[in-house]
Amino acid sequence: MYSLRSTFSRIRAAAARSLLFLSNPGQQGQEKLLQVTCSEARQQFWSGGARPAARSISWESRRRRSVGKFTGAQQQDGTFYELRTYTIQPGKMADFLKLTGDHIHLRTAHSELFGYWSVEIGCLNEVFHIWKYGSYADRAGVRAALAKEQEWQQNYISKMLPMLVNQASEIAYLVPWVEISTVPKGGIYELICYHMVPGGPAVWGNAFQKAISAHDHVGYCKLIGVFHNEFGELNKVHALWWHQNGDTRAAGRRKAQEDVRVVAAVRDSVSYLASQSNKLLIPTPYSPLK
């Protein structure tokens, strides 16, 4: 059983004491308390502050090798990303993309679009898009506003829904050791989804970071961001990469497989991996990430 509950309680108590300096904390103070508590809990979780009890000698040994401190700025303001995947009816992809392109301005008027892609290789007839929010209250306000916007509902939603087969939504945070990177226009993207063993970053975080960093240092691709699920499938991490094209990716992969640093890092992290999958993404004309 994790000590996360006690860690969370200590953080909440400390945040609550800080509210005593407010003459009337009210609703704003309560939201700030929750925001600080969740943010600090995530930071301690990634840095090994919440650790699982040993289940066996071998499991404890693996855990000790994995727990470590991480560098990089952690989001302290509650910012998170919503990763949405839509499965489109076969034969309707072109119509869907055009309809979305004609009306996406109605959607981006309410919140920030991080990127919008169609899936070229992987699961076919899919689109994948990422939206950025400052808080859960922010997201709730956006959803409520869109529900009341007649132009969006009548001209887009009513025409888009019949084209869909399925929708999926995940909420994820940027890991504390990665900052969002920018890329030159052009190129392709690769989304790799890792399902790690139960236990969270306190178990596999350090080994996972080393494996991702080793690939990034080879230089054949550019790391855009790494996102750890908060809602959706748990113990799931998404790594978004940029490549100049498919051939440079293939050449880079061969180079990485011959790099002893990459091989060593992957060998250490793979013991914590349950499964993984990847998709080749093509940015749409209206995607901020081209």
Image (cartoon, helix red, strand yellow):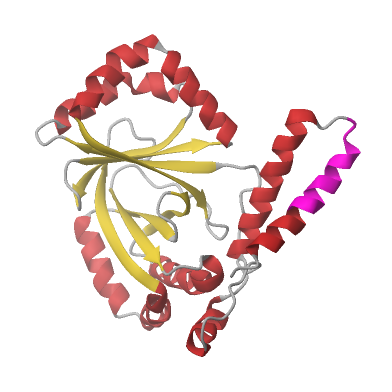
Prevalent SS, magenta region: helix
State left or right for residue 182 relative to residue 151.
Answer: right
Range drawn in magenta: 12-23
Extreme top residue here? 150
Is 5 part of what is drawn in magenta? no
Extreme front residue here? 1
| x 39%, y 18%: residue | 106
Q: Is residue 290 visible?
A: no
- Whether 285 is drawn above or below 13: the answer is above
Extreme bottom residue here? 57
Q: Can residue 23 be seen in this view?
A: yes
Q: Position of residue 285 (x, y in %)?
A: 28, 32
| x 52%, y 50%: residue | 173
Q: Quadrant of the C terminus?
A: top left
Viewer-proximal residue among 215 and 271: 271
Is 19 part of what is drawn in magenta? yes
Viewer-proximal residue among 34 and 1: 1
Viewer-proximal residue among 127 and 20: 20
| x 60%, y 67%: residue | 70
| x 57%, y 58%: residue | 176
State left or right for residue 55 relative to residue 258.
Answer: right
State left or right for residue 227 relative to residue 25.
Answer: left
Q: Quadrant of the N terminus?
A: bottom right
- Whether 151 is drawn above or below 281: the answer is above
Q: Position of residue 123 (x, y in %)?
A: 19, 50
- Whether 146 is drawn above or below 75: the answer is above
Quadrant of the image occupied by residue 71: bottom right
Q: Position of residue 99 (x, y in %)?
A: 23, 22
